[in-house]
Image: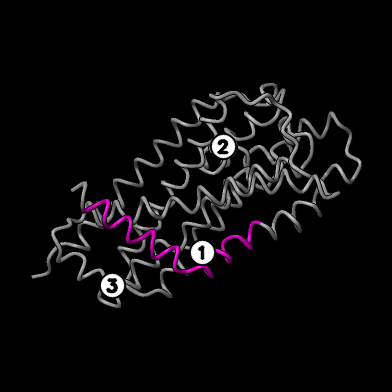
Amino acid sequence: MIRELGALTRRELLRLTRNPQAIMTSLLLPILYLLLFGQAFNLGNLGAPPGVLLSALRGAPTYFSYFAAGMAGFVAVTATLFIGANVIFDRLFGVLKRTSSTPAGPSAIFGSRLLAGCIQPVGLAFLVLGLAVALGQFGLTGLQVTASLSAIGVLEIVLAIVILSVMFASLFLAIGFSIEQPQTYFAVVNAINLPVLLTSAALSAWGLMPPWFRSVASYNPITLAVTVIRENLFAGSSNYYSVDPAVCLLALLAWAVWMIVIASVLAARALAPKN
């Protein structure tokens, strides 16, 4: 099991590195979001009073800083979209059938795709944070880290991004193993991805949300992840958060475990020998 899992994971990673166009496309989206939306909708540029700004953004000094932390969670989700599509294309081209005929079982096949698929989203999320900080050195509004990050804080941020990536990678794998046509897959994924993003606190200012919308957003897994990031990046944010980051991580982990169980069951059914 371990050897098969390692071999299949290496194969998936090699396929990723041999497709630089897909990597560049994944990088282009967060860069455009940071340069266009983050800079254009920065509330600080509109002269919002500092007290109102801190309250609306839950401790973030500027909207761009708030937005950049949300984008780290956003790209961790969008970069996993094609994981399920790869399953469909491999089924259409016979790759999945040949792989399932090897000694590697369904668990190794599913696990390898999950592990390999989570590496790129995690890397992109940290690239977004680094780029957001670097923009401040070029005369633009940059990410301002106003807290003293501890080792525990850094670990919490890493865990939030990793767990979020695992959860959505499992979700899209579940859809990929359940659907046979790529057109149907992308229609379903788009119907899920956009509402989940827009009902989270990734882009919308928390303090400006209606109460009912805030209640919905508080259970959104993207909100849970970006809350952990913001809590550790912005000093004084404890005045604006009522939930400890550890609680958010536990709730996010529950989401991920649930998705992994569903995806593994669907993968086992799809890879089972047909009579």
Q: Residue, x 56% and y 37% (percent of image)?
A: 218
Give how far apart the Cα atoms at labels 3 and 1 are.
21 Å
Q: Which residue is mark 1?
A: 190
Query: What segment is highlighted magenta in the picture?
Result: 4-30
Residue 53 locus on image (x, y percent): 81, 35
Query: Mark 1 falls on what kind of element?
Result: helix
Residue 157 locus on image (x, y percent): 55, 34
Mark 3 and 1 residues: CB-CB less than 8 Å, in contact?
no
Q: Mark 2 vs mark 3: which is more N-terminal? A: 3
Q: Nearer the viewer, mark 3 or mark 1?
A: 3
What's the magenta bit mostly, secondary-structure-wise?
helix
Specify the amino acid type for callout 1: Asn
Q: Nearer the viewer, mark 2 or mark 3?
A: 3
Viewer-proximal residue among 44 and 30 = 30
Q: Which mark is residue 91?
A: 3
Q: Quadrant of residue 82?
A: bottom left
Q: Residue furthest left?
A: 275
Q: Residues within 10 Å of mark 1 (few under 14, many from 20)?
A: few
Look at the image and say whether residue 264 sits in the magenta stretch: no
Q: Which residue is mark 2?
A: 218
Q: Residue, x 36% and y 47% (percent of image)?
A: 259
Q: Mark 3 vs mark 1: which is more N-terminal? A: 3
Please state if 15 lies on the left or on the right of 27 as rendered.
left
Q: Quadrant of residue 18?
A: bottom left
Specify the amino acid type for callout 2: Ser
Look at the image and say whether residue 24 sits in the magenta stretch: yes
